[in-house]
Amino acid sequence: MSSSSIRKHGGTGAASDQPAVPEPSFAQRARTLVYLGRIGSLSTLSRKQPGFPFGSVMPYGLDDRGRPIFLISTMAMHTQNLQADPRASLLVTQPDPSDDPLGSSRVTLMGNVLSIPEPELAEARKLYLSRYTNSKYWVDFEDFSFHRMDVVDVYYVAGFGVMGWISASEYNRAQPDPLADSMAEIIQHMNADHQDALVLLARTFAHIESQEATMTAVDRLGFHVRLKTQDGMKGVRIAFLREVGNPAETREALVEMTQAARSEV
């Protein structure tokens, strides 16, 4: 993604004399968030009140290009809206938001929601039911059918002050982070059992003294921590010494970094 499409509010970025910490692209982070999500807010264009958006709670499946798959009934208002105008947006938010939801990541997909062609229905059905097994009880009702959003643009918000547009082609090519399915477990474990290590890692690798440290996100290239310092709360990203691809490698990297940090004390 080009740097011109990323915006940062004044005062929210790192100091100019600090080297950039490697992290996944916005496209990769957006794909990971949509992969982790299970339910979004679908906005369609109202037939009853032309020009007004109509919001609906919407479970979705996902294909290998990150396109949301919906199983919707003809009786639903959003389906009737889509039949009149296929343009829609889907808002997906971080599954486990922090105490302040505006500080959590979220992504808005915009596109056209259309019926899935007959040759592609079997695969769409398989993908959707893999996420929502209970849907087997109504998937074959006559008034239900599968639709898919063909994404035309994406807007990603990483948290306070950092956001940007992602092209549909970048989004479609990106893949979810390899730690996606284990992120929540890693974060919970570090915050429950290793807060002292997080304080030490922040001191050694981010050069910030803190009284408390909480891991808020982790990916194959590093992790984010929220720090309680004498000057208030601060957020910082710390890079792994090497890229990781699974929970075991993540644990090895964190242990190695903690041992290195303790050797400097």
Image (cartoon, helix red, strand yellow):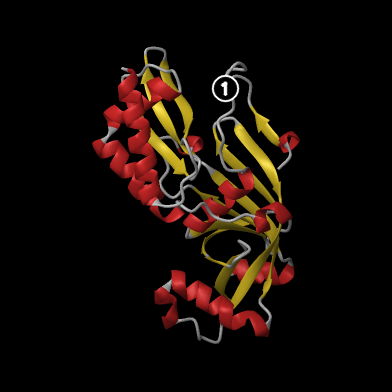
225 left or right of 145 in image = left
Q: Quadrant of residue 142?
A: bottom right
Residue 141 point in image, percent of width and height: 51, 85
User: What's the amino acid at mark 1?
Assistant: Ala
Residue 41 point in image, percent of width and height: 55, 56
Seen as rendered, the residue at the extreme top is: 230
Residue at left offset 49%, top offset 81%: 139
Quadrant showing the N terminus: top right
Residue 255 in sight here: yes
Q: Quadrant of residue 187?
A: top left
Seen as rendered, the residue at the extreme left is: 193
Residue at left offset 39%, top offset 47%: 249
Residue at left offset 29%, top offset 43%: 189
62 left or right of 152 in image = left
Residue 212 in sight here: no
Residue 54 point in image, percent of width and height: 62, 57
Residue 185 point in image, percent of width and height: 33, 49
Q: Could you tell me how many numbered marks the image carries?
A: 1
Give the structural element (helix, strand or loop) at label 1: loop
Q: Which residue is mark 1?
A: 14
131 shown above or below 170 = below
Q: Quadrant of residue 87?
A: bottom right
Residue at left offset 59%, top offset 27%: 20
Identify which residue, 150 or 256, lies in the foreground: 256
